[in-house]
Amino acid sequence: AQLEIARQNHVAGLAALALFSNENSQRLLDKGVAAFGPYTLHFAEIAKQLSEPERRDVMVAEFMKMLIRSLIKDSYDLVSDYCDATGQVEDLKLREWYRFARLIRNALARGSRFEFTTFDKGLALPVSWKSRTIDGTLDGKPLDLAFFGYVESWALFLEIRGFAGRLH
């Protein structure tokens, strides 16, 4: 159930991205607000950024990074915690995507930057999944959308969700 919520949140975020490119949404955002408790946030700033192509591109890329971070961290942590609580960690570690997902999750949690531990350097590298390889040369380097973007994040989520569906 929690993985389904992570999936729904990601899809809702993708819908927001689609709306950002619609010129009608800029007019709505210009007048829109979010009010909660004593706070009111006006969306005119977002409408302005969307009207300027260079700023829009940066905003969309950062928004997508946030969606990827949320999808992968949440799904990885949910499955890892469940496996830990139910004694299924060894089965998790046998998955071909596990080490790759662990390193991606850690990079996302560290400001989208690879920072390898001594363990990573000694035992886990290099790690390959699909057409991507993480090796020691990435230590200290940013995790960017060209390496792990829309397609890769969704494919990894599907692998994690598929594994979770077989857990007992």
Image (tube, rainbow, N blue to C red):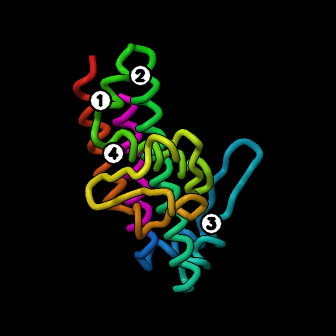
Q: Residue at 39%, 63% (x, y): give it.
A: 149
Please, what is the three-letter code of the amino acid marked with disc 1? Answer: Ala
Q: Quick one: SS at disc 1?
A: helix
| Cα separation between marks 4 and 2 | 16 Å
Camera-near label (1 vs 3) is: 1
Q: Locate residue 32: give its quadrant.
A: bottom right
Q: Residue at 69%, 58% (x, y): give it.
A: 41
Task: Residue under label 2, please give it.
Answer: 82
Q: Quick one: SS at disc 3?
A: loop
Q: Residue at 57%, 49% (x, y): give it.
A: 116
Q: Earlier in the sequence, mark 4 or mark 3?
A: 3
Location of residue 108 in the rendering, given as x and y in whole percent from the top left corner:
53, 51
Look at the image and give the residue range highlighted in magenta: 1-19
Task: Residue under label 3, please give it.
Answer: 43
Q: In the rendered view of the protein, which quadrant contains the C terminus?
A: top left
Vertical relation: 3 (above or below) 111 = above
| Cα separation between marks 4 and 3 | 31 Å
Residue 157: assigned label: 4
